[in-house]
Image (cartoon, rainbow, N blue to C red):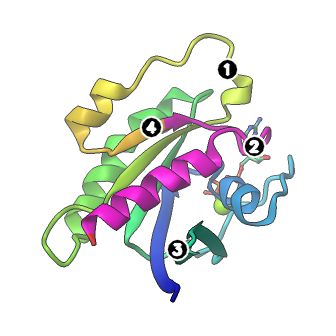
Amino acid sequence: MQQELLFKVLVIGDLGVGKTSIIKRYVHQIFSQHYRATIGVDFALKVLQWDNDTVIRLQLWDIAGALMVFDVTRASTFDAVLKWKDDLDSKVTLNHGKPVPTVLLANKSDQLTSQQPKLDSFCRENGFVGWFETSAKENTNIEEAASCLVEHILNNE
Ligand code: GTP
Ligand code: MG
């Protein structure tokens, strides 16, 4: 028999870094250059056939894990990442008191003019479970980042 799991994932980061675009790319396979700021929350549901035995519903808003996004073309949005992380950790912990697993997304990587510095040690030091260079525009690494998060959520269960 198949098990069905529901995970709530928070997508956070500074204004305009591409949160809505990442959700739309991941869930609806679309991208728009047109920017409309999100007021309140965007709600979206993604259904994953994870393996033969498991269907996962990812409800992209509340919490079980978090995708934290910054814009590689704007350093200030990376500087804000640690503030978002502190804010998240101070407000949300899992049942067993552990922090919420969080994956860092270096978004708009299609616009990178020089190499993005590696963030492995940054992630280790600051409690992120991993990081990915993503592009909602070119559909780069969105699935990989979300799957990485799901793996960590499953490990925490
Ligand atoms: P708020 O809701 O205001 O916090 O913004 P947001 O984080 O939801 O950003 P949104 O997805 O609305 O994207 C902001 C702008 O960046 C839009 O013009 C998008 O088209 C653009 N954008 C988002 N992701 C990418 C990307 O991967 N590459 C490029 N080149 N542009 C992107
Ligand atoms: Mg938005």
Q: What residue does disc 3 label?
A: 61
Q: State how far apart marks 4 and 3 are (Cα).
A: 20 Å
Q: What residue does disc 1 label?
A: 112
Residue 147 covered by magenta stretch = yes
Looking at the rendered structure, the secondary structure element under dot 4 is strand
**Quarter of the figure with the C terminus:** bottom left
Give residue 85's position: percent from left, percent from top: 31, 51
Within 10 angstroms of label 4, few (less than 14), some, or many (20 or more) residues?
many
Name the amino acid type tagged 1: Leu
**Which is in the foreground here, disc 2 or disc 3?**
2
Within 10 angstroms of label 1, few (less than 14), some, or many (20 or more) residues?
few
Question: What label sits on residue 72 in the rendered view?
Answer: none
Residue at (73, 25) in percent of width and height: 111
Tell whether circle 4 marks a residue whose Cβ is less than 8 angstroms from ligand 1.
no
Q: State how far apart marks 1 and 4 are (Cα).
A: 16 Å
Q: Counting residues from the N terminus, which is met first, the one under dot 1 or under dot 3?
A: 3
Residue 119 vs 145, above or below: the answer is above
Q: What residue does disc 2 label?
A: 139
Residue at (42, 48) in percent of width and height: 103
Residue 23 vs 69, above or below: the answer is below
Q: Counting residues from the N terminus, which is met first, the one under dot 2 or under dot 3?
A: 3
Q: Counting residues from the N terminus, which is met first, the one under dot 2 or under dot 4?
A: 4
Q: Which residues are magenta?
A: 132-156
